[in-house]
């Protein structure tokens, strides 16, 4: 499995079988993204919650590619009403797909989507444990620090944890450092920072504060081979 970061919380996964998965594909309006919503390929799109900077370009990408949208039930029903393929889940549940296994974990955050200038709540925010090819990643979504991250770390060994560090809307670097100690992932990659001034952070400084070689700053579009960790 290979992973790459594309600004904010957007992660692209390519499995050994060639399946392409996007998590939170916020591309249009994201100056940090290097992806093109008109050409990016996806077999599946996983959404952690409904905020516009996470749902992003889900609809046009799914319409063009036929990608399966995996999310909480409320978001899934919203996109299903638009004729798109969806699979709804809820926190604590897991499901085996042909591209890998997904387990939804809690996240402490909101989950509203703006439609015609008005916010509509679409279920609860979530984190994602994604396993395929004998490797596991944890995408925390947008969240505060919470002590049950210890249980997430104990659920199964985590190869890569993607943690928000932007502060203000999510946990900042200090709390993300504690989260990393709870999760005990082999690698910790900071996300959800530097997209706009209010969440500017120093990813290198965050990683330097983690145990030796645990922290890894990914440049935009840089690919990480999880099998080599």
Image: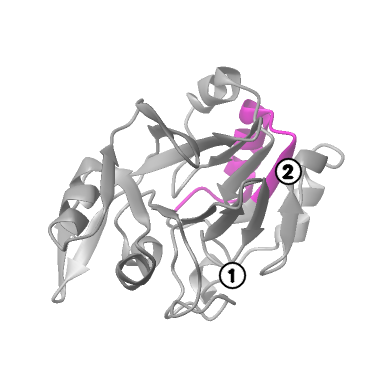
Q: Is residue 225 above or below residue 61?
A: above
Quadrant location of the N terminus? top right
Q: Secondary structure at mark 1?
A: loop
Q: Please tell me whether residue 188 belongs to the stretch shown in magenta.
A: yes
Residue visible at 58% across and 41% down? 175
Q: Please tell me whether residue 137 belongs to the stretch shown in magenta.
A: no
Q: Is residue 34 above or below residue 67?
A: below
Mark 2 lies on residue:
226
Q: Is residue 10 above or below residue 68?
A: below
Badge 1: how crowded within 10 Å, few (<14), some, or many (20+)? some
Q: Name the one closer to the observer, 205 or 59.
A: 59
Q: Is residue 48 above or below residue 65?
A: above
Badge 2: how crowded within 10 Å, few (<14), some, or many (20+)? some
Pick whichever of labels 2 and 1 is earlier in the sequence. 1
Q: Residue 225: x, y in percent?
A: 75, 49
Any part of residue 206 in sight? yes
Q: Which residues are magenta?
A: 170-189
Q: Secondary structure at mark 2?
A: helix
Residue visible at 62% across and 29% down? 183
């Amino acid at each position: 499995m290979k992973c790459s970061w594309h600004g904010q919380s957007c992660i692209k996964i390519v499995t050994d079988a060639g399946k392409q998965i996007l998590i939170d594909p916020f591309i249009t309006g994201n100056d940090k993204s290097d992806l093109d919503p008109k050409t990016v390929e996806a077999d599946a799109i996983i959404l952690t919650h409904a905020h516009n900077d996470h749902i992003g370009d889900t609809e046009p990408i799914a319409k063009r590619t036929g990608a399966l949208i995996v999310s909480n039930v409320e978001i899934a029903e919203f996109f299903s009403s638009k004729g798109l393929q969806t699979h709804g889940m809820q926190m604590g549940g897991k499901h085996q797909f042909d591209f890998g296994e997904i387990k939804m974990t809690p996240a402490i955050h909101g989950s509203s989507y703006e439609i015609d200038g008005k916010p509509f709540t679409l279920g609860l925010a979530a984190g994602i444990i994604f396993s395929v090819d004998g490797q596991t990643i944890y995408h925390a979504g947008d969240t505060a620090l919470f002590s049950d991250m210890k249980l997430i770390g104990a659920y199964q060994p985590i190869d890569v944890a993607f943690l928000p560090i932007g502060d203000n809307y999510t946990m900042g670097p200090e709390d993300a450092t504690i989260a990393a100690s709870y999760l005990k992932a082999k690698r910790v990659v900071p996300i959800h920072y530097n997209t706009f001034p209010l969440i500017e952070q120093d990813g290198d400084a965050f990683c330097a504060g983690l145990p030796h070689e645990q922290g890894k700053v990914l440049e935009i579009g840089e690919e990480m081979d999880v099998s080599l960790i």
